[in-house]
Structures are given as C-alpha cells and as structure tokens.
C-alpha cells in the first residue's frame, strides 16, 4: 500500500511540476517579429503643396493651371530587403487630395533592414478586368470606367489659361492596361519594434515634364487614347520620391 501511495505522490508532484513549467512558458513574452510602418503621401507641384482652386501653377510648357481634383491608385506594394528577399503586399490604396486621411496608411513588415519599395501606380490587370469591386476599388469613389470596364489610375481636373488668355477646363483621366507603371524607390528602412514613417511625395508637374513636355493647349481634355497615354506613361516614372524615413 505504501508503495502505491509513494508512486501516487511522485506522479502527482511531476504533474504539478510540468504544469508549472508550462505556465511559465506560456507567460514568456512573445518575440516581436513585425513592425508597423506608416506611409504618408504628399502631393506637390515643384515643391509647392497642392491647393485646390489655386490658378497659379505653371508646367514645363508654360501653361498656368489649377488643381480641383487629384487622386490616384497605388497598389501591390513590395518591400525589398538588403539581402534581396521580398515582402509583397496585396493592397490597393486610393490617394485622394480631397481627404487627408486617404494619404496615410499603415503596413506591418517583418523585422529587418529594407532598401527599396516597389508599387504599381494603377490597378493590376487581374483586378482591373474583374468588374466593379468593394473597398478602395468601390466605383463610388469615381475611379471606375463603366464604358471601358476598368479603373482610372489617375485623375487631375482643374482649369488652365490658354494661348488666348481664356480659362478652359483641364481634364486628364489616365488609365487602361497600357498605362500601368511600376514604381521603384530606394530607401534605407530598418524595421523593429519602433513605429517608422515613410514620407513619399508625388510631383504633379513631373507628370507633364519629362521626357515628354505636355502642352495643355488643344490637348486639355483626355480620357484615354494611345498616343496621350504613352506620353504620360513615360513621364510617370519620375513623379514619386522618398522624401524622408523617420
């Protein structure tokens, strides 16, 4: 009887010991493997902040113009580490100058050191031809072409002063699969437990500058067209820049 009692005591002690060890392990802090990074977009015209209704901006062709609407899609961000490993995100963000909140969003990245950020300006082919969708791709945001079954990637609307001194409407709606562009921006981004901030600027004047100078005279209302799309697409490459990593 004593033999069984002794075995019971030893067995019970082991259960308590293991239970205690498990509790200690469960209470250990979970190692942090991701960090939060806020991405902040600022829309500018050669260093000047975009202000709606301000008919005082001048493009490379010498046209004086205003901005009454400016919005564009960026999507499918990819962060590149210094060892060239990739961390892709399947996100779609509508940057709309009308709403400050739309110009900031957060991503969660694995801890590590990053050297580059890539993204599409526009909506990728799979989502663009899938019809009207929800979230940032909701047609209620006014970025979906019903007649073309696809998304507008960028809208700039306003007015400009033509060669005769008249104020005319200015409308550029940039989209279609031939307009999709990949942006690649270099940066130095160490991701840890600390929240980081990436500030990215979009320079509207660069859209009309290089390598193709866009003159608004007789060329001021566009919602597609291969020649115009090609000219703007070639200019889009230089419109974004990383201004700071905080």
Image (cartoon, rainbow, N blue to C red):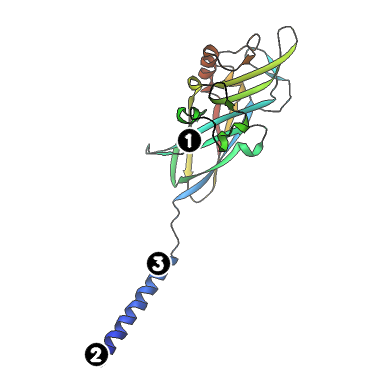
Cα distance, mark 2 to mark 3? 33 Å
Of marks 3 and 1, which one's residue comes earlier in the chain? 3
Residue 77's tag is: 1
Q: Is residue 67 above or below residue 211?
A: below
x 52%, y 50%: residue:
194
Evaluate whether residue 199 shows in this view: no
Task: Please identify, in this view, whether the residue under mark 2 or under mark 3 is nearer the observer.
Answer: 2
Tell which residue pokes out farthest to the top in this image.
Answer: 164
SS type, badge 2: helix
Q: Nearer the viewer, residue 157 or 130?
A: 130
The quadrant in which residue 21 appears is: bottom left
Q: Are marks 3 and 1 in contact (CB under 8 Å)?
A: no
User: Which label's residue is closer to the chain start, 2 or 3?
Assistant: 2
- Residue neighbourhood size for the residue with mark 3, other residues' Cα within 10 Å, grouped as few (<14), some (14–19), many (≥20): few
Q: Nearer the viewer, mark 1 or mark 2?
A: 2
Residue in the foreground of this view, choosing between 176 and 186? 176
Q: Write down the quadrant of residue 84 in the picture.
A: top left
The reply to whether callout 1 and callout 2 are in contact (CB within 8 Å) is no
Q: Is residue 231 left or right of residue 53?
A: left
Question: For mark 2, does the 10 Å Cα neighbourhood hold few (<14), some (14 to 19), or many (20 or more) residues?
Answer: few
The residue labelled by disc 2 is 3
Residue 64 image offset from top left, x and y in percent? 70, 16
């Amino acid at each position: 009887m004593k033999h069984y009692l002794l075995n019971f005591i030893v067995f019970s002690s082991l259960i308590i010991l293991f239970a205690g060890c498990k509790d200690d392990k469960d209470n250990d802090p979970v190692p942090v493997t991701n960090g939060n990074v806020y991405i902040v977009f600022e829309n500018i015209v050669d260093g000047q902040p975009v202000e709606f209704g301000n008919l005082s901006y001048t493009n490379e062709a010498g046209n004086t113009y205003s901005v009454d609407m400016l919005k564009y899609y960026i999507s499918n961000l990819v962060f590149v580490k210094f060892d060239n490993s990739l961390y892709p995100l399947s996100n779609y963000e509508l940057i709309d100058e009308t709403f400050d909140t739309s110009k900031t969003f957060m991503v969660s990245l694995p801890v590590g050191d990053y050297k580059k950020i890539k993204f599409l300006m526009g909506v990728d082919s799979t989502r663009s031809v899938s019809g009207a969708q929800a979230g940032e791709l909701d047609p209620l945001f006014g970025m979906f072409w019903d007649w073309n079954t696809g998304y507008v990637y960028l809208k700039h609307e306003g007015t400009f002063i033509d060669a005769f001194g008249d104020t005319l409407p200015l409308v550029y709606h940039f989209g279609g699969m031939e307009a999709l562009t990949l942006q690649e921006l270099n940066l130095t981004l160490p991701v840890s437990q600390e929240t980081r901030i990436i500030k990215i600027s979009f320079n509207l004047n660069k859209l009309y500058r290089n390598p193709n100078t866009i003159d608004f005279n007789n060329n001021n209302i566009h919602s597609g067209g291969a020649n115009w799309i090609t000219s703007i697409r070639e200019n889009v490459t230089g419109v974004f820049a990383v201004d700071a990593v905080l």
